[in-house]
Image (cartoon, rainbow, N blue to C red):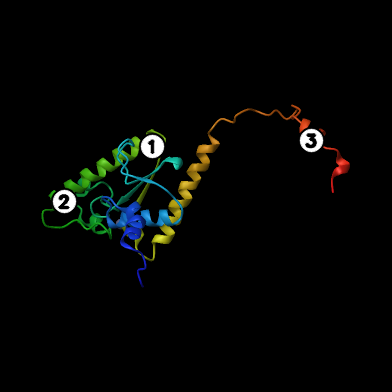
Amino acid sequence: MTDTMTPEQRHRCMSHIKGSGTKPELKVRQWLWSHGYRYRLNVKSVPGKPDIVLRPYRTAIFVNGCFWHGHGVRPPAAQIENSKLKIENSPCCKIPQTNRSFWLDKIRRNQERDQRNYALLQDNGWLVIVVWECQLKPDKIERTMREVELALNNNLLSLYKHKPLPYSTEEDEPLPQAAEEATPLQRRP
Ligand SMILES: [Zn+2]
């Protein structure tokens, strides 16, 4: 593929995806951007400083690495310290046998911090979407992101539904028709 952009064009084009993003986070951002969604990154004023914030949708997206955030490690890592079986059942978070208690503790603390952040956001009326690294593989990303998109749009609709209507119209209340009555019928083509 030939790159026909000048360095300046390339910089402008890529500037929306600069920052501290990890590779999985970049994939999510690129998908959203190319489908017309605009977002902000690591917004400090939003609880938990989510990776991606879509304010009009009141939605925060966290893109989690499977290992560091303990994907599939249930119950939380600390409770399964002596149960190798359950940990090995998670195909994308394999806790090392060496320094095992160190890793279990680290992942447990990450999980606890995640849960605190999600709860804080939800208590403030935010939709929290967690996208896992393993859901962004080439054969999975499209389906994953379509589900994210559906959740975003459902949330937007529910936000509108809960807004009070500007005025109420009773069924027996005559609607204003002055403009209609001023139009003579016979002038219609
Ligand atoms: Zn995973």
Q: Secondary structure at mark 1?
A: helix
The label number, if any, that marks residue 103 in the structure image:
2
Viewer-nearest of labels 3 and 2? 3
**From what the image shows, is residue 160 above or below residue 130?**
above
Quarter the N terminus occupies = bottom left
174 to 142, vertically: above or below: above
* Place of residue 156 in the rendered image (x, y in percent of width and height, measured from the top left): 49, 42
- Which element is circle 2 on? helix
Residue 80, x across and y down, in percent: 21, 49
Residue at 27 percent of width and 59 percent of height? 92
Q: Residue furthest right?
A: 186
Are the residues flagged by discs 2 and 1 in contact, CB closer than 8 Å?
no
- Closer-to-camera residue (59/113): 59
Left or right of 161 in this view: 99: left
Q: Determine whether label 1 and label 3 are within 8 Å by CB.
A: no
Density class for disc 1 (Cα within 10 Å; few <14, some 14-19, many ≥20) is: some
Residue with the mark numbered 3: 180
Dot 2 amino acid type: Trp
- Residue in the foreground of this view, choosing between 82 and 55: 55
| Left or right of 113 in this view: 119 | right
Residue wearing tag 1: 122
The tag earlier along the polypeptide, 2 or 1, is 2
How far apart marks 2 and 1 lie (CA) works out to 28 Å
Residue type pointed to by label 3: Glu
Q: Residues within 10 Å of mark 2 (few under 14, many from 20)?
A: some
Tell me the residue at 42%/48% (across/down).
Answer: 38
